[in-house]
Image (cartoon, rainbow, N blue to C red):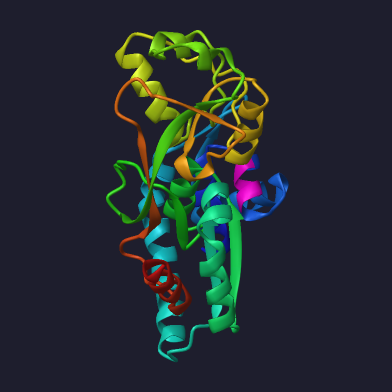
């Protein structure tokens, strides 16, 4: 069993999709399928049941899953241990981040990292919070900066770094501005411009509405907060945005309840040996 085939197996198992696994591995779907077929031939068992448009793990696939992770972890940890012995901050660091953190929190950290460690090669990927957790657990990135959540993944380490107080905003000439006190019922009857439903920010808002038996009206989800800000500023709806994004283009509404707070931070696998580059990045993030 070669490591590339095992990586393909874990990616397909994680996504339940050959095409999605190919996107993560930067391979074509056929290349991923070929690696899985070679692995199945080598070990003499079928790992996936192929249905019309879906796939699922066979019993053999379920049995291989933890062992494949252990094998890849051992290989990666061994390689990193040997490299780390040299004590140099060099090599490859894969880092995932949300667009908001990447634009508003990360630039000074990246600037210092690049200047201080020119021998390190940084690969930066932008993705949402749920995708970031998945990328870490699938060993596709070493570190991820994202909105933190209560995770059932016991092997994921969470390091809080910042927090965003979220404020309710609309355009200065929006009809909501005329109301003396905005209620959740008022907001439920007005289009909201929010991130995708699988994001932590959306779930924070949706939870408040569900507790009151209300349904969010969010017809145009987008994960780019800067895009949300633009759409709100021209009167297309209301939203919740980090307080540091609010300026003269927006009007702040009093949120009917306790203002939601997003906790932002770093995640990585607890039992994975971190590269010297990853350790250096964590140190810089803590310093900032």
Q: From what the image shows, is residue 278 above or below residue 166?
A: below
Q: Residue at x 65, y 36 (%)?
A: 227
Closer to us: 11 or 118: 118
Quadrant in the picture for residue 260: top left
Q: From what the image shows, is residue 121 above or below residue 116?
A: above
Q: Position of residue 145 (x, y in %)?
A: 46, 55
Farthest residue in the bottom direction?
A: 86
Quadrant in the picture for residue 215: top left
Quarter of the image for the C terminus: give it. Answer: bottom left
Closer to us: 167 or 203: 167
Q: Residue at x 42, y 57 (%)?
A: 68
Q: Position of residue 31 (x, y in %)?
A: 70, 51
- Residue 117 in view, yes or no: no
Q: Is residue 59 left or right of residue 22?
A: left
Q: Is residue 9 left or right of residue 271?
A: right
Q: From what the image shows, is residue 217 above or below residue 97?
A: above
- Residue 240 in view, yes or no: yes
Q: Position of residue 5 (x, y in %)?
A: 56, 58
| 237 in magenta | no
Closer to us: 31 or 245: 245
Q: From what the image shows, is residue 153 above or below residue 122?
A: above
Q: Residue at x 46, y 47 (%)?
A: 134
Q: Main secondary structure of the magenta part?
A: helix
Q: Is residue 203 left or right of residue 92?
A: left
Closer to us: 58 or 113: 113
The residues colored magenta run 20-24
| 22 in magenta | yes
Q: Position of residue 206 (x, y in %)?
A: 40, 22
């Amino acid at each position: 069993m070669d490591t590339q085939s095992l990586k393909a197996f874990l990616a397909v198992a994680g996504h339940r999709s050959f095409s999605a696994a190919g996107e993560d591995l930067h391979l074509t779907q056929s290349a991923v399928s070929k690696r899985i077929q070679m692995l199945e031939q080598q070990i003499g068992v079928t790992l996936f049941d192929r249905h019309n448009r879906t796939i699922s793990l066979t019993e053999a696939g379920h049995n291989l899953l933890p062992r494949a992770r252990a094998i890849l972890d051992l290989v990666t940890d061994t390689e990193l241990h040997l490299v780390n012995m040299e004590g140099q901050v060099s090599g490859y660091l894969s880092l995932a981040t949300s667009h908001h953190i990447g634009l508003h929190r990360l630039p000074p950290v990246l600037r210092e990292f690049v200047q201080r460690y020119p021998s390190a090669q940084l690969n930066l990927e932008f993705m949402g919070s749920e995708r970031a957790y998945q990328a870490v657990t699938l060993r596709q990135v070493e570190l991820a900066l994202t909105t933190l959540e209560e995770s059932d993944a016991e092997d994921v380490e969470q390091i809080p770094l910042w927090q965003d107080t979220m404020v309710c905003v609309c355009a200065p000439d929006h009809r909501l501005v005329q109301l003396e006190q905005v209620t959740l019922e008022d907001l439920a009857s007005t289009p909201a411009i929010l991130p995708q439903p699988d994001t932590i920010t959306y779930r924070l808002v949706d939870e408040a509405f569900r507790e009151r038996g209300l349904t969010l009206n969010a017809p145009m989800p987008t994960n780019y907060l800067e895009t949300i800000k633009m759409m709100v500023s021209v009167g297309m709806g209301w939203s919740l945005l980090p307080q540091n994004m609010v300026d003269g283009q927006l009007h702040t509404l009093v949120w009917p309840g306790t203002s939601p707070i997003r906790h932002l931070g770093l995640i990585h696998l607890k039992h994975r040996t971190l590269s010297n580059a990853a350790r250096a990045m964590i140190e810089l993030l803590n310093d900032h």
